[in-house]
Amino acid sequence: MAVNGVDDMKANKDIEPMAMRMRRRILDMSLRCEGPTHLGGGLSIVEILAVLYGRVMNYRSDDTRWVDRDRFILSKGHGVLAYFSALAEASIINEETFRSFKVNGSALIAHPVMNLDLGIESSNGSLGQGLSLAVGMGWAARQQGKTWKIYLVLGDGECNEGSVWEAAMSAAQYGLGNLVAVIDNNRFQSDGLTEDIISSGRLAEKWRSFGWNVHEVDGHDIDQLITVLTGSLPSEMPTCVIAHTVKGKGVHFMENNNEWHHNRLTQSTYEKAIASLTVAS
Amino acid sequence: MTLEINATTVRQWSRVGPRGMYGQAILDVATRHEQVVVLSADLGNSSGLDRFKNSFPDRFINVGVAEQNLIGVAAGVAREGFVPFASSFAPFISMRASEQVRMNLGYMNLNVKAVGIGSGLAMGFLGNSHFGLEDVAVLRSIPGITIVSPADCAEIVKTVRAAVDLEGPMYIRLTGSVNCPIVNTQEYDFEVGKAIALRGGSEVALIATGSMVAVSLAAAAELERRGLSAAVYNFHTIKPLDIDTLQGICEKYLNIVTVEEHARIGGLGSAVAETTAAWGNRPRHLIVGLPDVWGKTGDYSYLLEHHELTTSHVTAKVERFLGSDLKCCG
């Protein structure tokens, strides 16, 4: 549950250890499932999700269907390592469920599967679809006079999808001030650097020209993220936060190394990774 | 406003045609159900939605020329408790936005009513780019989506009303053009998933959907004049298929003919064949539909003639099927 008011600074300080715990969870999940996982793009969104679940969003851990909760959509569906870690940190999913990641028949697989009991608002995995869904939800909330917001995380590679821009145009057209899209701008996509594949170009200018209120932040700087995401946002304009991130952030041999886009951890690489986290902190 | 089905109204509705009728039906349900919202991809006017737009401007969402977003936004509003009807030309819904349909209506089972207007050959001179030749084939293979193809304008009213009451995703396939044939002239019982026996007969059962129901009725009348007794069933719901009724038909008849304004691959005929394939002593089955070629373009009546889906063609096909060991002539 987000904390408001007097203890803000203290609450902000809680986010950093939460992010650290999430990175440990990510490595644990990845090792435990004994298969390849999307490590790079999971590690790059840890602070974004820690800030959203630890500080920004209104929700009730024991009532995931609470109608006035803020909604979260992981449009870059392959970022589940961070997402499920955040849901566990937020006590929305219990430890038993958390440990069921990639167990045959589990609710937690390599992409989100809509499950309102587990706080998972939508099914994703096919890139470029989350924003359209969010636009519909934002339109519905406004129509119902509700004040909850929708936060979503998209990848920079995901923005190759034309459907992202269809949705972006419509969000601006409808003046959806209840919509906040965070772009995980880690500069890589599956096949390599975005600038070598399909360049994002001037991403901030693109979103601004599509009619969005745009902020740019260091996506690993908790204070910057909190300042933007808890600050006052325009009421009739969607907001895009371009979070400059490092793919594989926190594990030195994974940082900016696209071999870890989707890869398997062995016991020894796991131990190296854990050691790397400790050094970084 | 209440749309009452009687001899006078159905004649008026026939002149309006399926798209205009969809507009009237949606206005009718929206008046009584405030959770109904309507989405269009820059085809509000072509979809007969002008009056809805004027009557309920705050419940009309135009996403522009963006069918992928159309389906995604519809799913988002459905997700929050509204009942969205999202329409565009059949191929743009079923193929341009196919994966959005799959994720949102299929995988997430969201309560979206997708409406394919001008399906089949109705778009005439606009050409194959606008025809709905394969929409049922594509959408039928996605688990969980109900598919209804109304037989006439009265059935469009019935379908739209049923769609509001039935929780779950649905594809409504509108076939036929203005001055469309009339099947129903009075109030009748309509239930999604329940086929309607329209005419009895002893030698063959014609199993039809959408625009081809009227054609099949006319063909049955013509066959009777030629001494052949044909029953006609309206399978307005293609998915889920009414297996009970189909089973009854297969027990009674040695010959069945499915008739649809859709590719012979993947439509009602396929659905029937897939269902009956394992049944013992099943009837011979002729699948009448569009051939597996890109046809020439002309007006709607030219196209029905060209693709052999007129009353006289269907009559002749049934007659040949019954009179020979014809293997395939659909």
Image (cartoon, rainbow, N blue to C red):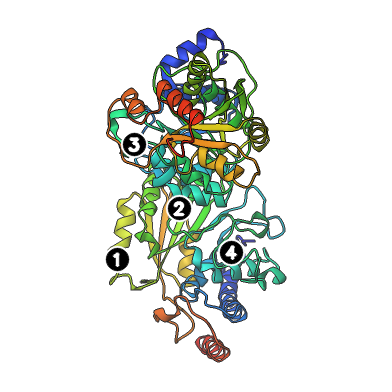
Q: Secondary structure at mark 2?
A: helix
User: Which residue is disc 3 drawn over?
Assistant: B130
> Which-is-in-front pick, marks 2 and 3?
3
Disc 1 chain ID:
A
The span from disc 4 to disc 3 (Cα, nearest Å) is: 46 Å
Q: Position of residue A144 (x, y in %)?
A: 57, 38
Disc 3 chain ID:
B
Q: Secondary structure at mark 1?
A: loop
> Which-is-in-front pick, marks 1 and 4?
1
Q: Residue flagged by tag 1: what amino acid is it?
A: Ile
Disc 4 chain ID:
A
The span from disc 1 to disc 2 (Cα, nearest Å) is: 20 Å
The disc label shown at residue A53, or none: 4
Closest to the observer, A116 or A250: A116
> Which-is-in-front pick, marks 4 and 3?
3
Q: Position of residue B103 (x, y in %)?
A: 51, 52
The span from disc 1 to disc 3 (Cα, nearest Å) is: 32 Å
The span from disc 2 to disc 4 (Cα, nearest Å) is: 19 Å
The span from disc 2 to disc 3 (Cα, nearest Å) is: 27 Å
Image: A191 above or below B162:
below
User: Which residue is disc 2 drawn over?
Assistant: A131
Disc 2 chain ID:
A
- Examine the rendering and report whether any part of residue B152 can be seen: no
Q: Is residue B5 left or right of residue B261?
A: right
Verify CB contact (< 8 Å) between mark 1 and mark 2: no
Closest to the observer, B300 or B292: B292
